[in-house]
Image (spheres, rainbow, N blue to C red):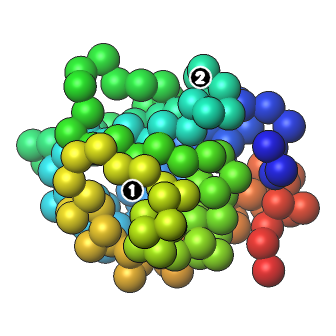
Amino acid sequence: MEYWKDANEPVKAFLELFNRALQDEELKQGLKKVNQLVWFDYTEDGPNCSFHVDSRGGQLLVAPGKPAEAPDLTMSLSADDAHRSWSNKLNPVMAITRKKIRIKGSATGLLKLAPKLKKISVIYQDVLKDMGWEDKIMK
């Protein structure tokens, strides 16, 4: 991994990113509309390097690891490419086309949030700063 010293760091950062994004009403409502159990699978970087978001039925749960139930959508990529994506330096549509992001299931709902990536990247930068990881912020 280029940006992370171990598999726990990206999970910690991405969980905090989603927890903070849920404090933003616009992002919260957008995530609710996804209405899926989504697994962000970064396990190519370690067996526990993943997290999931469950927005089914109006709930919004964010937790580490693979969900107990079969996910509606699995987004598989490296933790470094996830870092680039959350930093708004990797276009998700192009990354899917180039197979940097591999999808199992329908990503239509999640891709509708792509225009919000700039807002998410600002939150992500704040998360990295607050964790003392300013060196990971991509300019």
The answer to whether 72 appears left or right of 79 in the picture is left
Secondary structure, mark 1, is loop
**Which quadrant: the C terminus?**
bottom right
Q: Residue at x 35, y 41 (%)?
A: 74
Q: Amino acid at mark 1?
A: Leu
Viewer-side residue, 74 vs 94: 94
Q: Position of residue 122 (x, y in %)?
A: 61, 74
Q: Nearer the viewer, mark 1 or mark 2?
A: 2
Vertical side of 47 occupied by 128: above or below: below
Q: Is residue 55 visible?
A: no
Mark found first going from the N terminus, 1 or 2: 1
**Residue under label 1:** 22
Q: Please tell me in which quadrant of the rendered image residue 136 appears.
A: bottom right
Q: Residue at x 80, y 43 (%)?
A: 1
Q: Residue at x 16, y 61 (%)?
A: 33
Q: Position of residue 68 (x, y in %)?
A: 30, 17
The answer to whether 138 appears left or right of 120 in the picture is right
The label shown at residue 48 is: 2
Secondary structure, mark 2, is loop
Q: Position of residue 97 (x, y in %)?
A: 43, 69
Label 1, residues with CA under 10 Å away: few <14, some 14-19, many ≥20:
some
Q: Amino acid at mark 2?
A: Asn
Q: CA distance from mark 1 to mark 2?
A: 23 Å
The label shown at residue 4 is: none
Q: Residue at x 15, y 42 (%)?
A: 56
